[in-house]
Amino acid sequence: MAEPEFAIKVTGLTKTFGDFTAVDGIDIAVPRGQIFGFLGPNGSGKTTTIRMLTGTLRPQGGQAEVLGTDVVHHADQVQQRIGYMSQKFALFEDMTVDENLRFYAGIYQVPAEEFAQRREYVLRMADLVGREDELTRNLSVGWRQRLALGAATIHEPELLFLDEPTSGVDPVARRQFWDLLYELAGRGVTLFVTTHYMDEAAHCNQLAFIYRGRIIAEGSPSQLRHSQLDQRIFDIAVTDADAALDQLSGTSGIDDAYLSGASLHVVTPREESLTADDLRRRLIAAGFAAPTVREVDPTIEDVFVNLVTRHR
Amino acid sequence: MNGSLTRIGAVVVKEFKHLRRDPRTLAAVVLLPVIQLLLFAWAISFDVDQVPTVVVDFDHTQTSADYVRAYDASTFFSVVQHADSLAAVDGAFDANSARVAVIIPAGFERTITGGGRAQVAVLIDGSETNAAKVSQAYSVALNQLYDQNLTRAWADQQGLDLSGLGALQPQIRTWYNPDRNSTIFLVPGLMAVIIAIVTVQQTAVTLVRERALGTEEQLEVSPIRKGELMVGKLLPWTLIAFADVVMVILLGMTVFGVPMRGTPWVLALGSVLFVFASLGMGLVISALAPSAETANIIALLVAFLPSFLLSGLAFPLDQIPAILQGVSMAFPARYMVTVARGVFLKGTGFMELWPQLAALAGYAALMVIIAARLYGRRGRR
C-alpha cells in the first residue's frame, strides 16, 4: 500500500448532540510529518473533533481518514498506530514511572525487547533516568507531563493527538515540552495539537481556527498573520493599561481594543487614517503619562481575537 | 486473541499494583473477612446461655427455695440477684444486670402442698428479642419439668405408682445444630457478606475511579476493547473473592468446627453464580454512580446491608416483617445463604437447592445484561 500523503484527511465531518451542533461539516487535511495546530475557544468543538478522529466518538456525517484508514468504521485498525495525550496526563499516580510505562506498553503490545529500548529512550527524553522506581505522584508537573508524553508514545505512533497538553504547566516546562514535540516531528511523527496558548500556535507548521463548530480560518502562521487581517494593530505601552482600555474602547476610528500581555492592543480599519501619534495625543489629553504607541505586525493572538469578534 | 490476553494481563497486573499500594483496601479485602469471622464467633454471640436472672421470693419457704434452685441448676439461667420487691426488678432490667425475673408469690408452698396449681410470674426483658424468645420457651419447659417432679414427689408420698402414667419429660432438641452454636450457623452465611463486599463494592469503586482519573479516556483511544478492560479489572477481585471464600470456609471448618455435610460442588456452583451476580451488580452501580464516594455508598446499601440483614444471616427470615421478607427476595444474598447453610449444615444436595441456584443464575444473567447495556450506551455515542 502506498504511503498516503495525508496523515489526516477529513471532509464534511459533523457531530450533533441533540439540538446542538458541536462540529459542523469541517474539512481538515494534515500532511504527514507536520505539526498541526487546532485552535479555538473552549467549547468550540476541538475535543469533539479529536474524539471523532481517534475513533471514540461516531460522527453523524462526513468522512474521516486517519493514516489512510477510515477511522469511523475501522477505529481498531487505527488505534494501534496513533497516540493520544490530554491535559489530564492519564498516569496512575500510585504506580512508579517504570510501572506506568510497562502498563501502556502492555496495552499496545510492545514486544519485550522493543520495550527495553523504548523505555531507555523515554526515560532519557523525560529526564527521568534514575527515578524509574519513584511513584508518579511524587513527580512535579513538568516531569509528569514528559512522562505522559513518553507513555503516549511508547508504541511509536505515526500520529500523535495532543489535547491542550500544556495546560497548567509553567513556562519553562512548556518550552522544554515543545522541544520534545519538535524532536518527535523531526522523526517523522505527525502532531495534531490543540492549545489556547497563542505563543504556542506560532510553533506549528499549519493552523486551523475552529469557532462554534466551523473552521473559520486556516493556513501557516505567517499566512494567517498577513492575509486574514484587513486591519492595523497598534501596541500601546502605558502605566495603567486597564484605564487606557476603558478610555479608548468604542471611540471613533477604533474597531476593537484589548489587553495583550502587559500592553494594550488597538485595532483600526486598514483605510482609517488614524496614526500612532493620534492615539498618543488622545491618551495624553485624557491624562495618561508618557504612553508609547507603535504600529505592529499582528500576532496570532490578534488574528484569533479578530476572527472571533467578526464571527460573533 | 493473543493480543487480547496481553492487554488483559497488563490491566490485571496494574490492578494488583493499585491494591498493593492501597493498604486500606488491602486490609478490607484480606483482614476484614477474618475479623468478621472472629467477631461473629466470639464477640457477637447469638447463643442464649447463662441468662442473668433475678429472683423475688415472697414465699420464703423450703419449697420456694427448691424451685429457685431448679433455675440455678440449669445452665440456661444464672441467678444473679435475690430481690425483695418488684421495683428491684425494674432496676435490674434497666441496669441490664438481669434479663429474666422469677417472682414467687406468698403462699406458693401452701398451694402446692394443698394439691393446687401454684402461680409463678416469669418476667422477661423483651428488648433483646432473640434471648427473650428463647428464655420464654425454656422457662415454660422448666416449669413443666418442675411441675412433674412435684407431682411425682407428691405421688410418692401418697404411695402411688406413677410409672404407668408415663409422666412426660420434655426434651428439647435443636436439629442440625444440637449445641445451638451460632458460629457454625453464621460461618456459611458470612460467605455471602464477604463476596458481596469484595466484589460489589470493589468493582463499583474501581471502575468509577478509573473514569475520574482520566485514564479511562486514555484507554478508549488505545487498542484495548471495553470488554477486555472490564475483564482485566474484574478478574483480580473475582480471584480475591474466591480466595476469601476458601479462607473463611477453612477457618470455619478447622477453628470453629463447622461441618461439611453436603457436596462441595453445589456450594462451589452457588458461589460462582453469586460472584457473577455480585460483579454484575457492581458494574451496574459503577455505570450509574457519578463518583467513587457515591458508588461506595450505593454498594453498601444494595450489597452489604441486604446480605447481612435480609439474608437470614443475622435474623431468621421468617422473623422479619413480611414486607422486608418481600424485599429480601430482590437481593441474591438470601439464596446464597440458604445454599451455603444447606450444604454445610444439612447436607442438602442439588435436588433440594435447585430453586435457589436457579434464582442466583437468573439474577447473575439479569445483572450482566443490564451492565452490558449501560456500558454499551456509554461507549461510542
Image (tube, coloured by chain):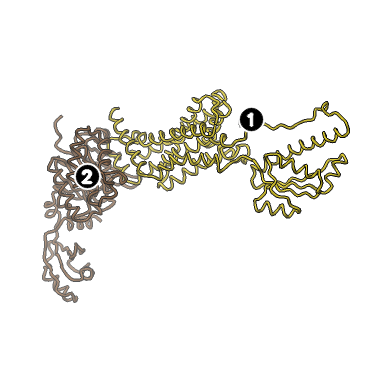
Q: Quadrant of residue B259?
A: top right
Q: Quarter holding the C terminus of chain B?
A: top left
Front-most of residues B260 and B8: B260
In the picture, one chain is yellow; tell me its letter. B
Could you tell me which residue is drawn at 72 percent across and 41 percent down?
B71
SS type, badge 2: helix
Left or right of residue B147, residue A110 in this image: left
Front-most of residues B279 and A12: B279
The total number of labels drawn is 2
SS type, badge 1: loop
Pointer 1 local density, CA inside 10 Å: few below 14, some 14–19, many at least 20: few
Q: Which x, y percent locates residue B254?
A: 51, 32
The circle on residue B106 is: none
- The lab-note entry on whether marks 1 and 2 share a chain reads no
Left or right of residue B287, residue A195 in this image: left
The circle on residue B175 is: 1
Residue B366 visible in the picture: no
Front-most of residues B372 and B305: B305
Left or right of residue B193, residue A29 in this image: left
Q: Quarter holding the N terminus of chain B?
A: top left
Q: Which x, y percent locates residue A14?
A: 27, 42
Residue holding disc 2: A149
Pointer 2 local density, CA inside 10 Å: few below 14, some 14–19, many at least 20: many
| Amino acid type, mark 1 | Trp
In the picture, one chain is brown; tell me its letter. A
Give the chain of mark 2.
Answer: A
